[in-house]
Every structure is written in structure tokens, then in C-alpha cells.
Amino acid sequence: MDLKDIQNLIKFVAKSGAQEVKLETEEIKITIKTGSEPAQIENSGLVQQLQSIPVVPTAIPNSAPVATEAPQKEEKSSDDEHLITIKSPIIGTFYRKSAPDKPSFVEVGDTIKEGDVLCVIEAMKLFNEIESEVSGTVVKILVDDASPVEFDQPLFVINPS
């Protein structure tokens, strides 16, 4: 089994949604775990770490040329300067509701107070309630329901009162 076969196996396992796959032959032992840990390969007692190769999207050229504009500076209005962004304290899956049949915790335009639950983030099968740090009005919800979020990723924009 060469490196290309192993990389294809890693991609296949990642797409399949399996948590862990083990493959053993006489000369090689492979364990692939999905998540943040790299795959391990044991071969004749040696352990190597394989890092998944990032897929870089490539642009498909259009038949018609496209004119590009010089980037414009985005000017913040004085209203935007006092807005507060609530960021994710953990990595996980963002949910706007406590259950699929329940209403969302907050909607754009809702008035909230400090300590109100804004969403839940599932991490390692635990649902963590994310509470508001300020009182105010929800201006924007920046993440779609059931989307993965990273640590420190902006989730909500709040206009403090």
C-alpha cells in the first residue's frame, strides 16, 4: 500500500462519517480516526503521522473576461462602532434551538438581557449553552443552524442598551 492509497483511504473515511477505521495486513496496520487527531500508521514497528492534505479550490476560468475593481475601503459608520460581537468560546456544532421542534432561542430584533441563552454548541456529545454577556438587541445572527463553528468565531452581533 503506497502513500497515495493511504491518502485516498483517509479521504474516503472522512467523507463516510465513520469515527474510526482499522485496517491490518501482514505488513501494515492503519488506524484512521476522524476529528482533530492525525491518522497513525504502524509498519514493522515504526509509527508515522499522516497529516491530511488540504484541498485547495481552483477557479474555473470563464469564457468572458471579468473586469476587477480596486478594493474599496469599508467605512464603518458610527452606529457599527458600538456594536458587540458574541464569539464562540469552543469548537463544535452551532444550534439555534434546543431541539428541532422547539423555537429558536433568539431572532434578529429580539431584546435580550445579560445571561439569556443565545444558542447551544455541541462539542463531544455535550450541549453547551452560550449566554449573552450583555443586554441589548440582536442585530445579526452570523452562523446558520447546525453549522460547525471554530473557537473565537463570531456568532452574533448585539446592539447594547
Image (cartoon, rainbow, N blue to C red):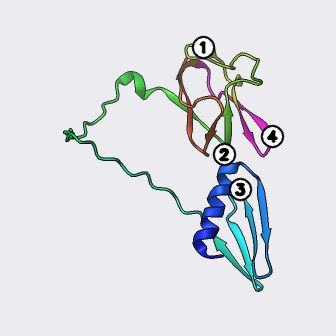
Crowding at dot 1, Cα within 10 Å, few <14 / some 14-19 / many 20+, comes out as few
CA gap, disc 2 and disc 3: 15 Å
Q: Amino acid at mark 2?
A: Ile
**Which picture quadrant has residue 92?**
top right
Q: Position of residue 75 (x, y in %)?
A: 30, 31
CA gap, disc 2 and disc 1: 26 Å
Q: Which residue is mark 4?
A: 126
Q: Position of residue 65 (x, y in %)?
A: 19, 41
User: Which of 83/69 is in front?
Assistant: 69
State which mark lies toward you, 1 or 3. 3
State which mark lies toward you, 2 or 1. 2
Could you tell me if the residues under marks 2 and 1 are in contact, i.e. CB atoms within 8 Å?
A: no
CA gap, disc 4 and disc 1: 27 Å
Q: Residue drawn 34% across and 29% down?
A: 76
Q: Where are the magenta residues, as a range? A: 121-136
Q: Of the two numbered discs 2 and 3 on the same chain, state the one appearing first in sequence.
A: 3
Q: Which residue is mark 3?
A: 34
Residue 135 is a magenta residue: yes
Q: Amino acid at mark 4?
A: Leu
> Secondary structure under badge 2?
loop
Q: Of the two numbered discs 4 and 2 on the same chain, state the one appearing first in sequence.
A: 2
User: Which of 35/136 is in front?
Assistant: 35
> Secondary structure under badge 1?
loop
Q: Residue drawn 70% across and 61% down?
A: 37
Task: Name the mark on residue 91.
Answer: 2
> Secondary structure under badge 3?
loop
Q: Amino acid at mark 1?
A: Asp
Q: State whether residue 71 is above or below residue 75.
A: below
Q: Residue drawn 76% across and 86% down?
A: 44
Task: Name the mark on residue 110.
Answer: 1
Left or right of 53? Residue 49 is: right
Q: Of the two numbered discs 1 and 3 on the same chain, state the one appearing first in sequence.
A: 3
